[in-house]
Amino acid sequence: MTLPKLAYLTGEYPRASDTFIQREVAALRDLGHEVLTCSIRTTGAEHLVGPEQRAEHARTFGVLDAAKSPLTLIRAHLRWMRTPGRYLRALKLAWATAPKGVRGRAYNLIYFLEAGVLAAHLADNGVQHLHNHIAKASCTVAMLASELSGIPFSFTIHGPDIFFEPHHWRIDAKARRAAFVACISDFCRSQLMCFADPQDWPRLHIVHCGVEPGRYAPAAHDGKNLLFVGRLAAVKGVRVLLEALAQMDGRPQVTLIGDGPERAGLEAYAKALGLSDRVTFAGYQSQDAVAAALGETDVFVLPSFAEGVPVVLMEAMAAGVPVVTTRIAGIPELVEHGESGLLVAPGDAEALRDALQDLLDDPERRRDMGARGRARVLAEFDIRQEAARLSSLFQSYTKGAPPPPKRPEAAT
């Protein structure tokens, strides 16, 4: 059976902070799909932290770079103007879905120009289906490219920030026009249902992000080491972690893998709390380096204020590391409190301190939680199985079959 040829589009690809998309693409290729990768902007050098990122970067089509060529831009749009009805419908859609104000209109017209270039690239390469991750500006480009070319599109919606401005990003229109939407959790799906028309609900499916469990070797480490992986941004709650660390017994160490706008402020705050010798700011690291760090830690901590279903938690659990995180959004669909980790209220430094201290003081409990967490990831968050579920959706909607179940079966 010939599988549909796919294209993937995101705002920036590949990125060190979005390795789950890269794994999904690789898993779809392993299933037999040909997948072209496209990125609106060129990824910064700081994100090309390993051979996987560099290889993907080299093979990815840069939409904005191509659109900056006047000849490429004009040729692409002249091509679509040959079907004036479709071209005008796409232009009307760009105008109708633009955020309010002159700035919003201007941006959507820019997205329309980019969409013409992307659509030409897809058509030239025989792409049968376009898939987007994140559902923001790049998804607007995907929607308009679909309207111009007639190539169906779908998208994966994550949250939480997309749900802070759902009307700005017109997720209602995107859900209506998409062949289907992959939601990363039931919580995420419920948030989209707040804005999508009920007639579109059957096309909102649950497909988890996933990890490669074989990449992570469970290790029974026994020490006082904590690990955080994520962007150093306010939403991740790292200041709360530092406050908790300052109150803990036994002088545990924490390694922070990642970078972001809060780094300088967090380094200063750690120094003010007298933690400079106990906090390591490691910056962005490759997937292999993160896997190695998980093998040397005792507890993984993610004190976020807002999340989808964090892939870094899946990675930690796959490595048999117990997790301490916050009881928000879709996290309880991954982490069962008291079984594979501990959940605390967001922003509560004392509760975070107590949970971390309890696990650091109880090696046997850590090992039990780590084993249950790995079993959970193997059952529901293995990227090979989740990619197979996505593949079944691509195949089903390409054939025009009735909508599959909310949680689709994996393609065989």
Image: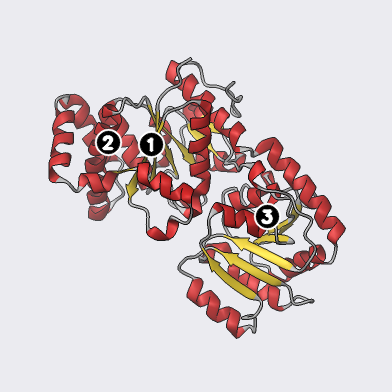
The alpha-carbon separation of the residues under discs 2 and 3 comes to: 39 Å
The alpha-carbon separation of the residues under discs 2 and 1 comes to: 10 Å
Q: Which residue is mark 1?
A: 173
At label 1, the amino acid type is: Ala
**Horizontal relation, residue 44 to residue 328: left or right:** left
Residue nearest the viewer, comparing 124 with 117: 124
Write the residue at 84% across / 60% down.
Answer: 363
Q: Earlier in the sequence, mark 2 or mark 3?
A: 2
Question: Secondary structure beneath disc 1?
Answer: helix
**Horizontal relation, residue 186 to residue 397: left or right:** right
Q: Earlier in the sequence, mark 2 or mark 1?
A: 2
Q: Residue furthest front?
A: 51
**Horizontal relation, residue 190 to residue 170: left or right:** right
Q: Which residue is mark 3?
A: 327
Q: Earlier in the sequence, mark 3 or mark 1?
A: 1
Write the residue at 85% across / 62% down.
Answer: 362
At label 3, the amino acid type is: Arg
The disc placed on residue 93 is 2
Disc 1 packing (10 Å; few <14; some 14–19; many ≥20):
some
